[in-house]
Amino acid sequence: MASYNPQEALKQYRQLGIESEVNTASSHRLIQMLFEGAISKLAAAQGALDRGDLATKGEALSRAISIIAGLRSSLDLSTGEIAENLDRLYEYMNIRLLEASAQKDSQKIAEVSQLLKTLKSGWDEITPVH
């Protein structure tokens, strides 16, 4: 199982301005919140792109990219292959979102959203260690 640095995750999520829940959340919940935030921002970007609102699309994609970068930076790469694979996957997601933004490509946004939903689903199945 990949290991995340809870302090880095906390720092990243605080930047989203959801202090009250963050202050009481476990490290496991913080990662769930990051997944939820990224998925939400991708949905907003998709909707904005569909409406032709390129400014909102760009802002939402930028926020999603930042959240994914936060997930990536919170990985403990010393834990082995799973963390290393996640690192590469997060890098891939950010590249795809940059491409999606430049090319106005909703399929690339949908691809990353599905990847995040799959990761979140797996994360949700993990029983937190207290």
Image (tube, rainbow, N blue to C red):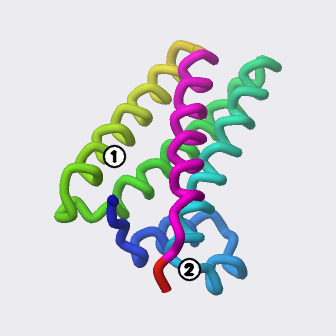
- Residue 50, position as x, y percentages in the image: 77, 18
Amino acid found under the numbered disc labelled 2: Ser
Main SS of the magenta part reads: helix
Q: Which residue is drawn at 64% across and 40% down?
A: 59
Q: Which of 79 and 90 is in front in this view?
A: 79
Q: Which residue is drawn at 49% across and 29% down?
A: 97
What residue sits right under mark 2 in the picture? 26
Q: Residues within 10 Å of mark 1 (few under 14, many from 20)?
A: some
Q: In which quarter of the image is residue 91?
A: top left
Label drawn at residue 86: 1
- Residue 115, position as x, y percentages in the image: 52, 34
The magenta-colored residue range is 106-128
Label 2 secondary element: loop
Label 1 secondary element: helix
Cα–Cα span, label 1 and label 2: 21 Å
Decide if residue 38 is on the left or right side of residue 53. left
